[in-house]
Amino acid sequence: MYFAYFDETGDTGMGDKSPSGTFALSCLLVHDSNWLAALDQTIAFRRYLKNNFRISARSELKAHWLIHNKGGIRDAQLSYQARMAAYRSAMRFQRKCGLFTSFTILIDKNKIMKKNTDVRDYAWGYAIQRLERFGTGKKDNVHVLPDEGHGEFIRRKIRAMRRFNTVPAAFGGAPLDRKATNLVEDSSDRRSHESYFTQFADLNAYAAFRRVYPGANFGADIYEELGDCRLKEVNAINGGPVGLVVWPK
């Protein structure tokens, strides 16, 4: 079975009161047979961050904190360049570890015409569709572990798509039946400060957002550090950055 850790960046609000124009939902997948090895390697990586960047292993590794020098990151007294080097190291580690698979759903709210759109519904709908296809391809099950905050919504969404889910055929024809029966049990919330893997998902979500909308001091190239741990199948037909589904196109 695969564990699917999720975290997000941006917000789900629509209209002028929304503080951001996007909502990104990122997934980090690890198989249960590799879970302990992935954890052990991640613990070793956090020791590396402590030894080279003075970032405590107990400090939450959040994109917002690294960028804006907040939370436990501030205690390390790092320059912005050093904090970005640590960010890159975390992205690169996921690739070098060889035990993770990552993908991201990015909702571009500025391109949505209907201002009453439930952004969460679209983001999680696309994510669950990709998990169903991933699990089917691997002939294995998936268990979803989202960051706390939307637990009841996610549980209801998974339960509904387990019973009814159709997707358009890629090249025309009747819709395809894609019930998410390989997503087992209700989702299990995680507190991000207690889960290194959820923290990686947070970093990936922000880097994916900046892959589409680069910032003045945060380029699109940081997302590329993930390399071949990105799940290319999620947007193989529609194209775009590897492992990154952007909606609307």
Image (cartoon, grey):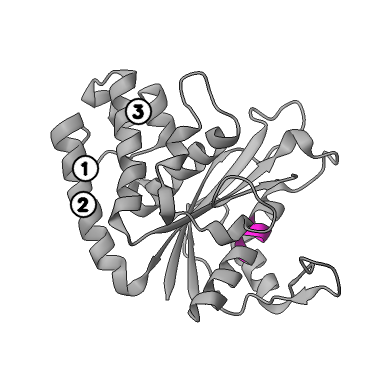
For the residues labelled 3 and 1, the Cα–Cα distance comes to 17 Å
Crowding near the residue tagged with mark 3, few <14, some 14–19, many ≥20 C-alpha atoms within 10 Å? some
Three-letter amino acid code at the position of disc 1: Ala
Q: Position of residue 24 (x, y in %)?
A: 58, 43
Q: Are marks 1 and 2 in contact (CB under 8 Å)?
A: yes
Residue 57, numbered circle: 1
Q: Position of residue 198 (x, y in %)?
A: 40, 51
The residue depicted at 75 percent of the width and 45 percent of the height is 248
Q: Which residue is mark 2?
A: 43
Label 1 sits on a secondary structure element that is loop
Placement of the C terminus among the 4 image quadrants: top right
In the visual, does 27 lie left or right of 44?
right
Label 3 sits on a secondary structure element that is helix
Three-letter amino acid code at the position of disc 3: Met
Q: Nearer the viewer, residue 220 or 103?
A: 220
For the residues labelled 2 and 3, the Cα–Cα distance comes to 20 Å
Q: Is residue 166 positioned above or below 204 on the image?
A: below
The residue depicted at 56 percent of the width and 48 percent of the height is 25
The residue depicted at 54 percent of the width and 36 percent of the height is 211
Crowding near the residue tagged with mark 2, few <14, some 14–19, many ≥20 C-alpha atoms within 10 Å? some
Sequence-wise first label, 1 or 2: 2
Q: Bounds of the magenta span?
A: 124-128
Q: Residue 127 in magenta? A: yes
In the visual, does 200 lie left or right of 22?
left
Three-letter amino acid code at the position of disc 2: Ile
